[in-house]
Image (spheres, helix red, strand yellow):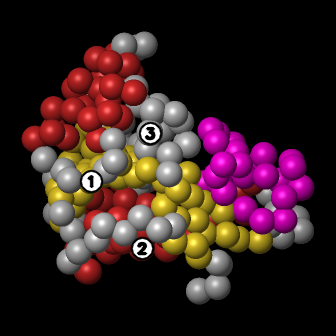
Amino acid sequence: KRVAILISGGGSNMLRLVEAMQDGGFATPVLVGSNDPAAAGLARAAALGVPIAAVDHRAFGRDRAGFEEQLLRPLLEAEPDVLCLAGFMRVLTPAFVRRFEGRMLNIHPSLLPKYPGLHTHQRALDAGDTQAGCTVHEVTAELDAGPMLGQAVVPVLPGDTAETLAARVLVQEHRLYPQVLRRFVAGERAPLMLAQAG
Ligand code: GRF
């Protein structure tokens, strides 16, 4: 299976996915794309030998379709079987999503359906939640709402800030996403539930 990954920043989740594929051999990373040519993850992907592409979304203003049309060019050339969003911070149009429906994954830093959207950790703290975590789900036209493929749960600790909680969750993102992708590629769809232990 050929896997393309879209990032917007450091790409720490992308790195774990690429390393898992290269070590485990269960799929092939065929492209890492970004909406930001300066995304640090692009150089990290290239260092692992993965082809990269970037389309600066700021060059398109509010023309979301125009941006996606350009992003689709290298993406379709790579002929991916699966598209993973990993720290990708642009909302994609339903037309784009439809092209990959059923084979497009995203990782979101909350226990969906709680806290779709942004600032998930602060919202969990403000609500006094005792648990937090991350979710890998299939991407559908509705934001952060597709079928759930896996979750990892962490405790919220006394004195936690959004930053300390984000760091704890990110460690679990790096565990969860590669395991979910491996199962997804193998045709498995039953949600994978991980607790924080090790
Ligand atoms: C992190 O906030 C992570 O929780 C979310 O995207 C952001 C950047 O992730 N999934 P990455 O390091 O670029 O993968």
Which residues, given as a range, are shown in magenta? Answer: 109-132
Q: Quadrant of residue 21?
A: bottom left
- The amino acid type of the residue labelled 1 equals Val
For label 1, the residue is 82
> Can I make out residue 9 in this image?
no
Left/right placement of residue 187 relative to residue 10 reads left
Q: Quadrant of residue 153?
A: bottom right
Q: Quadrant of the C terminus?
A: bottom right
Q: Which mark is residue 140?
A: 3
Precedes in sequence: disc 2 or disc 3:
3
Distance (Cα) linking label 2 and label 3: 21 Å
Q: What is the x, y in percent for residue 112?
A: 64, 52
Distance (Cα) linking label 3 and label 1: 14 Å
Q: Are marks 3 and 1 in contact (CB under 8 Å)?
A: no
- The amino acid type of the residue labelled 2 equals Gln
User: Label 3: how many residues lie within 10 Å, few (<14), some (14-19) or many (20+)?
Assistant: many
Q: What is the x, y in percent for residue 177?
A: 45, 65
What residue is rendered at 64% in x and 42% in y? 116
For label 2, the residue is 179
